[in-house]
Image (spheres, rainbow, N blue to C red):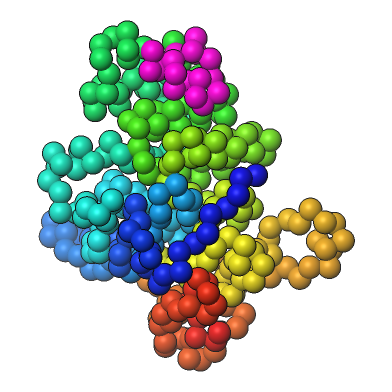
Amino acid sequence: MREHKTSSDAPAGAAKTPPLMDLRNLKVYFPIKSGVLIGRTVGHIKAVDDVSLYINPGETLGLVGESGSGKTTLGRAALRLVEPTDGQIIFDGQELRNLSNQDMRRSRRELGFVFQDPYGSLNPRMTAGNMIREPLKIHKLHNGREDLSRQVGDLLETVGLARSMADRYPHEFSGGQRQRIGVARALASKPRFIVLDEPVSALDVSIQAQLINLLQDLQEEFNLAYLLIAHDLSVVRHISDRIAVMYLGKVVELSDYKALYDNPLHPYTKALLSAVPLPDRALERTRERIVLKGDIPSPRNPPSGCVFHTRCPMATDECRVTVPTIKEHAPNHYAACINL
């Protein structure tokens, strides 16, 4: 396990030194249409609601929460794969939302994305080599056919696959090998920042560990910054430098990995951590499991006040009307809860 980096002692939404990726007050609202002919907007789905996060060069920010919390939408919005409704996306000092399509295409070379589903994210009609070759061609990162083939082979070896596998189709690979191809494809354009959208959730546990180790090795070799999206806190524990916990479009807690695991502040984070199995069986038997009632509410009609109050064991009447702001409760440890 590699040594974790130290977080900057800056506010939750801004780094002490210029970060590589800086998301400021980001909102992604999807309109709800009504009427076949008129198609007027009758409401919005608030998938991401006023989120501020930053990622430093070479750092991993883990983003965790249940399905429906807005994690994937946030990751896609950071790369402008989904257009934000409001807010800023500042990459290496440049506001991406102000760029033209042509300038954004050039900037996209430094931005990578690894999809969740290793089965659905690869084109079944293309060989592994052709899929990795595509970004090299698009961004003109080669010097002819021989150099193109050499780079494809190098990328396959970098992710632990044989050069000879370039001519195989997706159905000839296992799930773990397919995800390695997805990683190789993301690396092809020589990015500096990669969004990893639940990269191991569809894999067996033994294969998960291998892929996490590969991602760590690649990060150290190429000084990559990661936004690692996961619903399982045990997955992000050993690779993340800081962890943000997201619920119904909002970040409810943000801290370095050690403080979050040793002293979680928000009741939602405590519930998530209580579901993570402990290796010590004696501790596991004596630990109190926090079971949340009901399902995560719909972002189409989020609760008033604190969005978590409908499931929170600590909720008071004030929580139903007061929207908590994320505040620093300990050095570099932020949480959004009025009862702290």
| Up/down of 318 relative to 164, above or below | below
Which residue lies at the image location 15% right of the left edge and 54% below the top edge? 98
In front: 21, or 10? 10
In front: 267, or 6? 6
- Magenta region, main secondary structure: helix
Residue 138 on image: x %, y % = 24, 26
Residue 125 seen by the camera: no
Residue 313 on image: x %, y % = 62, 80
Residue 6 seen by the camera: yes
Residue 126 on image: x %, y % = 37, 18
Q: How many marks?
A: 0
| Up/down of 99 relative to 309, above or below | above
Query: If the image is split into quadrants, where does the C terminus sit?
Result: bottom right
Whether residue 30 sits left or right of residue 323 in the image: it is: left
In front: 168, or 215? 215
Q: Look at the image and give the residue range highlighted in magenta.
A: 150-166
Which residue lies at the image location 12% right of the left edge and 60% below the top edge? 38
Which residue lies at the image location 40% right of the left edge and 31% below the top edge? 187
Query: If the image is split into quadrants, where does the N terminus sit?
Result: top right
